Amino acid sequence: MSPAGCSHVSGFKVDNWKQNLRLIYQCFVWSGSVETRKRKVTLNSMHQSPVPVLFFSHSAIDLLYGGIYCFVCQDYIYDKEMEQIAKEEQRKAWKLQGRNISDYYQCIGEKYSMWEPTKRELELLRHNPKRRKITANCTIGLRGLINLGNTCFMNCIVQALTHTPLLRDFFLSDRHKCEMQSNSCLVCEMSQLFQEFYSGHRSPHIPFRLLHLVWTHARHLAGYEQQDAHEFLIAALDVLHRHCKGDDNGKKANNPNHCSCIIDQIFTGGLQSDVTCQVCHGVSTTIDPFWDISLDLPGSSTPFWPLSPGSDGSVVNGDSHPSGATTLTDCLRRFTRPEHLGSSAKIKCSGCHSYQESTKQLTMKRLPIVACFHLKRFEHSAKLRRKITTYVSFPLELDMTPFMASSKESRMNGQYQQPVDSLNNDNKYSLFAVVNHQGTLESGHYTTFIRQHKDQWFKCDDAIITKASIKDVLDSEGYLLFYHKQFLEYE
């Protein structure tokens, strides 16, 4: 079929075709009244095929969903005028049946009503014929941020969030429905921030309103002292999560275990904790939501074991690393290995009915769309305050299958055998942002590497944006690593 649509449908568009089509939809498809529904039942009982159809000209109408099929093109067709009539008659039928019109959009799979330009908008489009084309080398979305006084911790996270694909799509689609005063809503400010980033302006943006709202809603971050970028990320996600309650998907945000706001849709995963009694081997399982995974590093006061057997220079999880280098996979192996809790941390076993020693193991029950890994480079204890500078090699592509709860049985002593079926892409991720910290615990600076297009990386250093190579990204120290799922499940 040509881009112009089906040419054969013009044979139906004669005389009073619009009125005739409306009658077909009223009487045989949507059937708003009792009489038309009875007529439709009678007609359906006469059809032998599982999907009843009504024939006209070279076409037929599907009486279940209203789709139009052309026998010449041998395909379902789209005609703007016919589609408009079908939707108008469907809405009328729902009103006749006394049903909520908002349920209509849910029924047809449209959570939000389609945008139809108003006369004013059409006039603006006519007076502004220039259209911006998105090309492989397009820099739309790249914009520096002015440092307002030790606010690099905020700027680096804002760069990562504004280049999170699904979050960008949400805000640029104007889907937030605010139930707060807009001048106090962080989601409204983020929506405005996305508009600024993707407006095409190249001058650095001054995020003073964002900083004010952060100080208002996360008072522990208020002031001009240096702050932790990871702490800001969690605080920002928490405030955004709470302020999304007005959105259709955030109505249940009061219950953190049943929230489907945009923040939880993208960033929330499920962490499974299995505590096994060493006497009866009974297992107690809990699943908790998480927004990020904090990983211990070699060189910290916490013993780090084991290093992966691939640390001799082999390829582990798609990443070739030099001999002796610690990898992100090593850190994840350590995070998901069984841990003996010891005699000082006995738990009451429901099977033994007494306090027993046990082992605890963490695995991923459900993976988020965006996986954020926090490399614990800042060590704070009663005796020690320092930054851990251990180099950790991280890959461009990451397979989380070995760390899933479903893979637990195939893992022995913290090791994992790669399955034969390597075509399963459900748990595969691609790197799209890296936050780095340069300097010491007392004095430092945050920057971000972000992926603009495939294999096109840029370094964001407050107001300065420069092109970066993949080597620059992978050779960086790494503090926060942002990975996006390669394939999304349709829900």
Image (cartoon, rainbow, N blue to C red):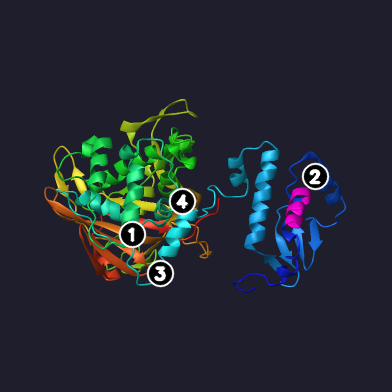
Q: CA distance from mark 4 to mark 1?
A: 40 Å
Task: Report the number of discs.
Answer: 4
In the picture, residue 430 is in which quadrant?
bottom left
Front residue (pair 361, 56) = 56
Q: Earlier in the sequence, mark 3 or mark 4?
A: 3
According to the picture, the residue beneath numbered tag 3 turns out to be 133
The residue that appears at 38% across and 34% down in the rendered structure is: 357
Q: Earlier in the sequence, mark 3 or mark 1?
A: 3
Question: Tags 1 and 2 in contact by the CB under 8 Å rule?
Answer: no
Viewer-nearest of discs 2 and 4: 2
* Left or right, residue 423 beside residue 93: left
Does the magenta stretch mainly form a helix, a strand or a loop? helix
Q: Secondary structure at mark 2?
A: helix
In magenta segment, residue 108: no
**Up-down relation of residue 207 to residue 72 (above or below):** above
Question: Tags 3 and 1 in contact by the CB under 8 Å rule?
Answer: no
Residue type at mark 2: give it. Thr
According to the picture, the residue beneath numbered tag 1 turns out to be 199
The N terminus sits in image quarter:
bottom right
**Magenta residues?**
19-28
Q: CA distance from mark 1 to mark 2?
A: 50 Å
Q: Earlier in the sequence, mark 4 or mark 1?
A: 1
Q: CA distance from mark 3 to mark 2?
A: 48 Å
According to the picture, the residue beneath numbered tag 2 turns out to be 36
Q: Earlier in the sequence, mark 2 or mark 4?
A: 2
* Left or right, residue 71 beside residue 267: right
What residue occupies the far left of the structure in this picture? 442
According to the picture, the residue beneath numbered tag 4 turns out to be 404
